[in-house]
Image (cartoon, helix red, strand yellow):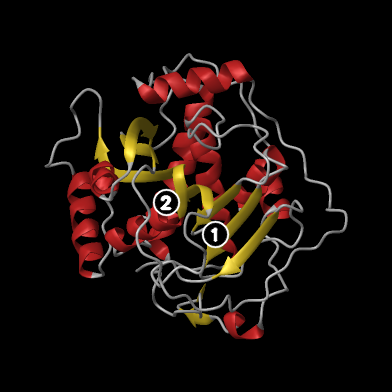
Amino acid sequence: MAASFSAHQSARSRPSPPPLDRRALSNDSRRNDGPAPSTPHYDQPTAAQQSEAFQQALNTIEVQGSSDDDSYSDSGYEESINSAFLSTSTSMTSSVRHYDFENGRRYHAYRQGHYLLPNDDAEQEREDIKHATVLIVCGGKLHFAPLPQNAPDARILDLGTGTGIWCVEMGDHYPSAQITGVDLSPIQPDWVPPNVNFIVDDIASEWLYPENHFDMIHARHMGVAIKDWDHALDSAYTHLKPGAWLEFCEFDYWPSCDDGTMTEDNLHFQWHVLVTEGMIKAGVDLHAALTLKDRITKAGFKNVTERIMKVPLGSWAKNPLLKKVGSYMHAVLYDGLQGMF
């Protein structure tokens, strides 16, 4: 059984709209410029392993037989994400740290209730597992938009940055770019590359940046966060430079099988229908990925490209990297439900 994952990239090309009134930046986030603690080691897959997993995700994922060897190991992964990316920042104002606690889970206080999921350590680990999943499925790529490697002073915005792990890796990969992550929760690490910073804000409100400002705007897994897609896409268009890039990466959680055995009378399928109906009542579209290409095109973007990758659910895949992805996705899906219901 697999879920689908789609990556959308598009370029802005139309004239900019009239200017908007703006409020001032209202946070005092900062980074530490001292030496960062060492990142724990974990086994990195080879380029050949990443390429094979990427090609299978684009086409058909092979099923593992009982005699197949599972030789790939990433035994240090959990240590890595727990140690390197789960420390919380202490540089924000105290008001945004007045967290809300319910049923043993911790939720954001700023714009309380705008986002359904928690922001505690368990949820942060789940977010970093999603990041690892996407990296594998995308062949190790942090993005598909054609950014030049050494573009001087490029500005990149990450919407709903979460733990900030994508920003941190982008900051290392593009040392001359300025990377900004925005989120409702101040849960990002202190120790980040000097070209990375984080802001606590709500993208559902008026954006704080100048028009024609960014060279790329990126967002992942925002289907459960964005309720007004027209506002989000129009805001992105306004604040991107002409010719700049927008990239969304979203999971579509409908279960399916290449051989057609996932039918509507399957209990898992029926369970997912009920979850989808419940989320709709909360204003959340779990399947926003299915309409995102049309929404992006409607917002005026050009050269819109959609890639759909298959993501296994469970450890049935023959490819060792995709087998690991299947285990990750099982945890991502079922652990995430506990924070919402």
Q: Quadrant of the N terminus?
A: top left
The answer, for residue 227, to whether it is visible in the render is yes
Question: Looking at the picture, which amino acid does disc 1 mark?
Answer: Gly
Numbered tag placed on residue 221 in the rendering: 2
Residue 121 at what x, y percent from top left?
A: 60, 64
Residue under label 1, please give it.
162
Numbered tag placed on residue 244 in the rendering: none
Q: CA distance from mark 1 to mark 2?
A: 10 Å
Residue 316 placement: quadrant:
top left
Task: Report the front residue among 311 and 270.
Answer: 311
Q: Secondary structure at mark 1?
A: loop
Tell whether label 2 touches label 1 (CB within 8 Å).
yes
Q: Quadrant of the C terminus?
A: bottom left
Q: Is residue 88 found left or right of 24 in the rendered image?
A: right
Residue 115 at what x, y percent from top left?
A: 41, 69
Which residue is painted at 73% across and 73% down in the image? 90
The answer, for residue 163, to whether it is visible in the render is no
Residue 173 placement: quadrant:
top right
Whether residue 100 is situated above or below residue 299 in the rendered picture? below
Whether residue 301 is situated above or below residue 2 in the rendered picture? below
Residue 222 at what x, y percent from top left?
A: 40, 55
